[in-house]
Amino acid sequence: MRHRLISLALVALCGIAWWFALLPTREARAASPIPVFAYYYIWYDPTSWNRAKSDYPLLGRYSSDDRAVMQQHIQWAKQVGITGFIVSWKSTPTLNRRLEQLADLAESEEFHLAIIYQGLDFERRPLPAERVASDLAAFCGRWSGRNVFNDLYGKPLIIWSGTWEFSVDEVRLVRERIGNCALLLASERNVTGYERLATLVDGNAYYWSSVDPETYPDYLGKLRALSDAVHRHGGLWIAPAAPGFDARLIGGTRVVDRKDGETLRRQLAAAFASAPDAIGLISWNEFSENTHIEPSLQYRDQALRILASVLGTSPPTLPELGSEPLTPTGPSYGLPLLVLAATLVLGSIVFLVLRIHRVTTYPGNRADASPTISFDHSHLGEP
């Protein structure tokens, strides 16, 4: 009898272990089969938050050099089903250092990275084509061999922001310089612009952050027309989706209200309806244009909860303001709860098995029975 009880307990323990092991698999199956990327910015210094900001990250006014902040961003993004970040970059010592750090962290988290090369300067003027070619060739030489950049498509994916400001000859110069080391996508805003460059690029990613789906005529039709044009040329189409827009503090006049998340829901629906090869969420942390989905003081995790509901995942658990530090502490919040639950269940099974064994071995509390064993189980469930 004793051996049978022990066997039953072992079967139960194996079943519980199997259930916990399947948790990541269930989440992965629920996620969208279409990759979902979020545009990600590594330009922040503590002083960046003093200019043109009306909302601030829940993690504080961070520096993009902060390793813990980057790691928390990746963990939150992964939990809601985001495949990777499209990182805003051009070659400078600061941005190269930060990209290297982000690549290390993403690799350890099995998270993907792509690049959006900033081809325009702060005044929205195009950089010299030779500078673009040199930077992208340097990127290929330094990072193209890293899995975090090439696991998804077999080679790095680079979006060239501002291609509409460059001539066909300038785009050809860059294409010839980098060869086939990377997939090079244009960022054209209409079919005519894309067709101008179609033979020199591998697709198109439209960074349409300021559209209002309620007022733009045939919003979905424009996305589908771009998708059709890109696919006719065998290219990749990355469809845009944003939660809202407000760039008035940096000179803009347009405002797209978030409408308690309805704007994001509508833009995601249109993006998925345009037959995309990937979704480009605008953005993880562009706080100057207020397109951020990163948890913030004003919007908390509203965007991540909506994204999780669309992708069939779960939103992260955020700390309450004023109750505990907002600085990331490493692992996701769900793991300690799973461990605690497993400890409680396993401890209860062991206790019940031993109690049944005691009753069956010493029926009726006979006077000649051995003394019963008492257990101090007050520690069960402690962290």
Image: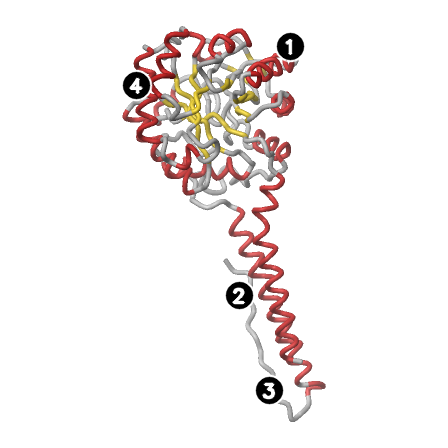
Separation (CA) of disc 2 from disc 3: 23 Å
Q: As drawn, which residue projects farthest toward the bottom?
A: 368
Q: Position of residue 201 (x, y in %)?
A: 45, 17
Residue 179 location (% of width, % of height):
37, 21
Which residue corresponds to the image point at 33% horizontal and 18% vertical from the top-left?
Answer: 177
Q: Which residue is identified by label 2?
A: 379
Q: Amino acid at mark 1?
A: Thr
Q: x%, y% of residue 235?
A: 52, 20
In this view, the residue in front, 195 or 161, is 195
Give the residue number, with chain letter if any, for mark 3.
371
Q: Nearer the viewer, mark 4 or mark 2?
A: 4
The three-letter code of the residue at mark 3 reads Pro
Front one among 20 and 301: 20
Looking at the rendered image, the disc whose residue lies closer to the viewer, 1 or 4, is 4
Within 10 Å of the Cα at label 3, are there few (<14), some (14-19), or many (20+) other Cα atoms?
few
Mark 1: secondary structure: loop
Q: Secondary structure at mark 2?
A: loop
Q: CA distance from mark 1 to mark 3?
A: 81 Å
Q: Gap between marks 4 and 3, in whole Å?
A: 83 Å
Read off the residue under disc 4.
134
Quadrant in the rendering for residue 222: top right
Whether pointer 4 and pointer 2 mark residues with C-beta atoms closer than 8 Å, the reply is: no
Please name the residue that numbered disc 1 is placed on: 215
Taking the image as shown, residue 207 lies to the left or right of residue 115, namely right
Looking at marks 1 and 4 on the same chain, the residue that comes earlier in the sequence is marked by 4
Please tell me how crowded label 2 is: few (under 14), some (14-19), or many (20+) other residues with Cα within 10 Å: few
> For the residues marked 2 and 1, what is the alpha-carbon distance in whole angstroms?
61 Å
Q: Three-letter amino acid code at disc 2?
A: His
**SS label for mark 3:** loop
